[in-house]
Every structure is written in structure tokens, then in C-alpha cells.
Image (tube, helix red, strand yellow):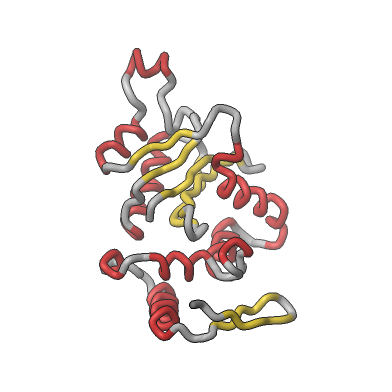
């Protein structure tokens, strides 16, 4: 895991939603919904993601106050809580350019699709499940983020993963597929096709 994206989004309910997305696989590693978008809640969610999947090498954020201390704040208070947390964990903090939403575009797209399709889901939990485990992604050769994530993990990083029976089954199936290099069918709505890797 080299890079995760993160950002906050305000919901119609006036609550705040934060998600962490793995750059290579598009997997939402963790998310949370809170009354306030704070550094403490930002750290709480990343701690849960790291507990489950391990630490990324880098985190990409915008310059929101939950993530970054501005020059004035730096002179007065030093680095932000989030920056201190990342430094303690040895995670490099990458900042997007000011007013350049494209830098964090993968996560912006994730939030945008939710805005377009939220009427199809009963909850954010259901949407994230669909995004991670059901929806084939064009950028992932019509695979799901969870399968791509597990496939890209080095074996030595998988000791504590997965943590649920469903994750264990998916993990075994994905590892088996990679080991056997067999044809894998992808189901895309009313039709399907088979793809071969290698």
C-alpha cells in the first residue's frame, strides 16, 4: 500500500463523512460519519483502517484544518494533530495544490457517485459495500476494489488480514485465482465476459 487519499464531505443531514481510499485498488479502507469534521475524528478513522490493513506509505489530503496547519498556525502552534500522528507512524503527508480538486479526484469521484446514486442505497454502509465488493471498475479492468487490493498485497502483509469470514473467503478466492492464473469471469449487468491475465 503506497498511497491513500482522504477527505471530508458534508452530507445533506449536515453530518460529515470521511473516507480513506487506497490509490491503487480504489478500496475504501475505512470511513466514518460524524457530527463534526475534526482532527480527532480523522485520526480515529485512520487508526481503524491501519488496524485492519496496515499503514500506507503516504496519505494525500487537501489543506483542510483537520489535516494541515497553515503557515500562521504553524508559527503559533506547530504542526497539526493529524500531521503529528502521520509523522509518529512514519507516513508521508502529501498536500494537494490549493483549489485543485483533481489531485484528490479518485475520492471526489467516489463521493460524486454516491451523490448520483444515493437513492439506490439504504445507507452509506450499503454504498461502500457496493463500491468495494460489487461494482466492477473500468479503471481496474472491470474488477472490484477488494479483489484488486488483496491481489496487490505482498503475502507477508496478509498475516492479520482478513478479519471477517466474508473477507477470508474473498481473500482465499482471490489468492487462488492469482496462483492458478485461470480465466476469471466478470459479470456486468445483463451480460458477462471472461478475461485472462498474463
Left or right? Give the position of 41 relative to 130. left
Residue at (37% x, 41% y) in the render = 43
Residue 148 screen position, x and y as percent:
48, 67
Extreme-front residue of the structure: 198
Left or right? Give the position of 24 relative to 127. left
In the figure, residue 137 lies in which quadrant? bottom right
Nearer to me, 29 or 33: 29
Q: Is residue 65 above or below residue 183?
A: above
Q: Is residue 165 visible?
A: no
Residue at (51% x, 39% y) in the render = 35
How many numbered circles does the render carry? 0
Residue at (40% x, 75% y) in the render = 171
Extreme-right residue of the structure: 190
In the figure, residue 100 lies in which quadrant? top right
Residue 14 screen position, x and y as percent:
61, 38
In the figure, residue 53 lies in which quadrant? bottom left
User: Where the N terminus falls, by quadrant?
Assistant: bottom left
Left or right? Give the position of 110 relative to 34. right
Q: Is residue 161 above or below residue 198?
A: above
Q: Is residue 197 visible?
A: yes
Residue 15 screen position, x and y as percent:
57, 41
Residue at (44% x, 77% y) in the render = 174
Residue 109 screen position, x and y as percent:
63, 49
Q: Is residue 42 above or below residue 162?
A: above
Nearer to me, 176 or 35: 176
Amino acid at each position: 500500500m503506497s498511497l491513500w487519499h482522504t477527505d471530508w464531505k458534508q452530507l445533506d443531514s449536515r453530518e460529515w463523512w470521511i473516507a480513506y481510499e487506497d490509490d491503487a485498488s480504489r478500496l475504501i479502507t475505512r470511513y466514518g460519519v460524524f457530527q463534526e469534521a475534526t482532527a480527532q475524528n480523522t485520526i480515529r478513522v485512520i487508526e481503524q483502517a491501519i488496524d485492519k490493513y496496515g499503514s500506507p506509505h503516504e496519505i494525500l489530503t487537501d489543506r483542510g484544518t483537520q489535516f494541515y496547519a497553515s503557515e500562521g498556525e504553524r508559527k503559533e502552534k506547530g504542526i497539526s494533530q493529524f500531521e503529528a500522528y502521520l509523522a509518529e507512524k512514519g507516513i508521508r503527508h502529501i498536500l494537494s495544490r490549493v483549489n485543485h480538486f483533481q489531485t484528490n479526484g479518485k475520492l471526489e469521484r467516489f463521493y460524486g457517485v454516491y451523490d448520483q446514486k444515493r437513492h439506490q442505497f439504504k445507507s452509506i454502509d450499503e454504498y461502500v459495500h457496493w463500491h468495494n465488493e460489487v461494482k466492477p471498475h473500468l479503471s481496474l479492468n472491470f474488477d472490484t476494489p477488494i479483489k484488486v487490493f488483496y491481489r496487490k498485497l505482498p503475502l507477508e502483509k496478509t498475516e492479520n488480514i482478513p478479519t471477517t469470514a466474508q473477507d477470508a473467503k474473498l481473500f482465499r478466492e482471490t489468492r487462488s485465482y492469482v496462483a492458478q492464473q485461470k480465466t476469471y469471469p466478470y459479470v456486468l449487468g445483463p451480460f458477462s465476459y471472461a478475461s485472462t491475465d498474463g
